[in-house]
Image (cartoon, rainbow, N blue to C red):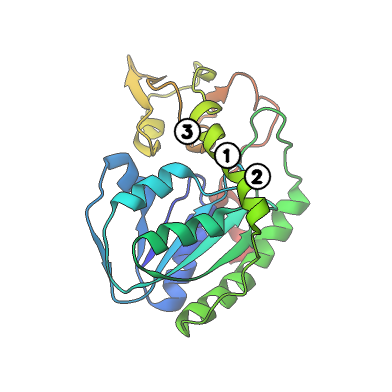
Amino acid sequence: MIMFFSATGNSRFVARSLAKLLDDEAVDLMRRMHDGDTSPLSSAKPFVLCMPVYVDGMPLPIYRHLKETPLQGSRMAYAVVTMGSYAGIAGRQARELFTSKQMEFVGCAEIAMPRNYLVGLAPEEKLESIEAKLKAAPEGIARVADAIAHQAQYEERHVSNLEYRLVLPFVYAWDGLAFPTKKFVANDACISCGKCERTCPVSAIRMVGGMPTWTKRHCMHCMACIQNCPTRAIDYGNALQRKRRYRFEKYRHLVE
């Protein structure tokens, strides 16, 4: 079973590509998180977690969700992370998660994909970089699929104890303190479609009077609401006024 979390399509593409190559099913964790669904997942084949890297680590809401979700059947697990340039300690966190479930963690692969986080000082990724990453992705995905098909160990990047101890507190601090929602805004271009409310994995958005309202103080900053808005009506302050929005589907032709 290929489990995936994807706000703008990168990890969804990787997961569905793996599912096709491995004749397996892909399960959308983002939808399950939105619905608060922690019912058991069962698979005869190894579990594969496809996820993005947030702030040099595994997004903690995903960690917590899977911690509460029984995984039945196969006792083998892999992780595949999509990242702009650095996977941080995400693989080691995935190892801890699956080990805590008495599962054999076989390894973590890394696939470079375009960045979707453009808030604050985050730079806009150049088109040539986006194209280069996407054109290289299918070959990397094929190597990952081959390893999983043979239940082989990944040669994953080593995360030292020092790196782990330095990064982990930052991951937890950022998760708890640095993802405020107060700057999210919607302008008159909003067409009241409710897509932002339906896609928010932590249910931080409610449609009030036909406009999105952020009802929680903090969220994941996954950018699903901003990047998937069909009319570009949502922004974070004015962080994206002059920046290119990113959704994988816009660039799908590069991998076909």
Residue 173 percent across, percent down from the top left: 55, 33
Q: Residue at x 55, y 59 (%)?
A: 91
Give the distance between the C-alpha atoms of the residues marked 3 and 2, in whole angstroms: 31 Å
Q: Is residue 151 left or right of residue 178?
A: left
Mark 1 or 3: in front is 1
Q: Are marks 2 and 1 in contact (CB under 8 Å)?
A: yes
Q: Nearer the viewer, residue 71 or 81?
A: 71
* Residue located farthest toward the bottom when viewing the structure as drawn: 150
What secondary structure is marked by label 2? helix
Give the distance between the C-alpha atoms of the residues marked 2 and 1, in whole angstroms: 7 Å
User: Disc 3 marks which residue?
Assistant: 225
Q: Is residue 229 left or right of residue 112?
A: left
Instruction: Tell me the tag on residue 49.
Output: none
Q: Amino acid at mark 2?
A: Leu
Work out which quarter of the rendered image holds the N terminus and state it: bottom left
Q: Are marks 1 and 3 in contact (CB under 8 Å)?
A: no
Q: Is residue 245 visible?
A: yes
In the rendered image, which quarter is residue 239 located in?
top right
Q: Residues within 10 Å of mark 1 (few under 14, many from 20)?
A: few
Q: Amino acid at mark 3?
A: Cys
Instruction: Tell me the tag on residue 166.
Output: 2
Q: Are marks 3 and 2 in contact (CB under 8 Å)?
A: no
Earlier sequence position, callout 1 versus callout 3: 1
* Residue located farthest toward the left when viewing the structure as drawn: 39
Q: Nearer the viewer, residue 137 or 54?
A: 54
User: Disc 1 marks which residue?
Assistant: 169
Give the distance between the C-alpha atoms of the residues marked 1 and 3, in whole angstroms: 27 Å
